[in-house]
């Protein structure tokens, strides 16, 4: 695929919107896929780890420190392959400043598959 950089074998879907809408949507998507027997997880910011603790969360780092998110992203994507994840749902950051680089990498890994809530 032309726009796809390194991505885990599992299907990544970005979930975009206000945090108060995104967190429940991540929980819903996770539960749906888990109920369908899929190996699934969520990529979330440190700030949302407690709320998503029962959704096999992977900590991207703090939304307040995008350099940490940028530093962790590639390793997390590789780790998801090792875990054999089939579906992965991820929070997003605004595509400005360092967030632009993070979203470029994450968007390409997801083949730009996005749900807006």
Image (cartoon, grey):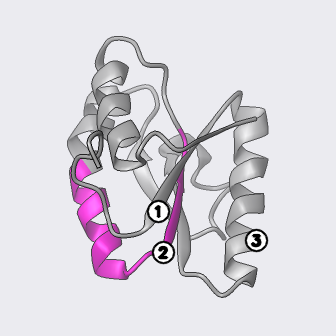
- Image coordinates for residue 19, horizontal then vertical, percent: 69, 33
Of residues 2 and 89, the one drawn nearer to the viewer in this rendering: 2
Residue found at x 44% / y 25%: 64
Q: Which mark is residue 11?
A: 1
| Number of marks in the rendered image | 3
Q: Which residue appears farthest toward the front when viewing the image?
A: 1
Of label 2 and label 1, which has the lower sequence position? 1
Q: Is residue 77 above or below residue 56?
A: above
Is residue 116 found inside the magenta-colored segment of the image?
A: no
Element assignment for label 1:
strand
Q: Quadrant of the C terminus?
A: top right
- Image coordinates for residue 27, horizontal then vertical, percent: 73, 59
Q: Which residue appears farthest toward the top when viewing the image?
A: 97
Q: Is residue 95 above or below residue 71?
A: above
* The quadrant where residue 106 appears: top left
* Magenta-drawn segment: 74-91
Of label 3 and label 2, which has the lower sequence position? 3
Disc 3 designates what residue? 32
Is the C-beta separation of discs 2 and 1 under 8 Å?
yes
Is residue 80 found inside the magenta-colored segment of the image?
A: yes
* The quadrant where residue 69 appears: top left
């Amino acid at each position: 695929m032309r726009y796809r950089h390194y991505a885990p074998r599992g299907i990544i879907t970005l979930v975009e919107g206000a945090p108060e809408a995104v967190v429940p949507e991540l929980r819903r998507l996770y539960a749906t896929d888990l109920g369908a027997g899929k190996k699934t997880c969520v990529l979330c910011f440190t700030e949302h780890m407690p709320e998503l603790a029962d959704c096999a969360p992977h900590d991207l780092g703090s939304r307040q420190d995008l350099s940490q998110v940028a530093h962790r992203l590639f390793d997390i994507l590789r780790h998801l392959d090792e875990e054999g994840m089939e579906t992965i749902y991820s929070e997003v950051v605004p595509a400005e400043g360092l967030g632009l680089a993070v979203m470029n990498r994450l968007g390409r890994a997801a083949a730009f598959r996005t749900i807006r809530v």
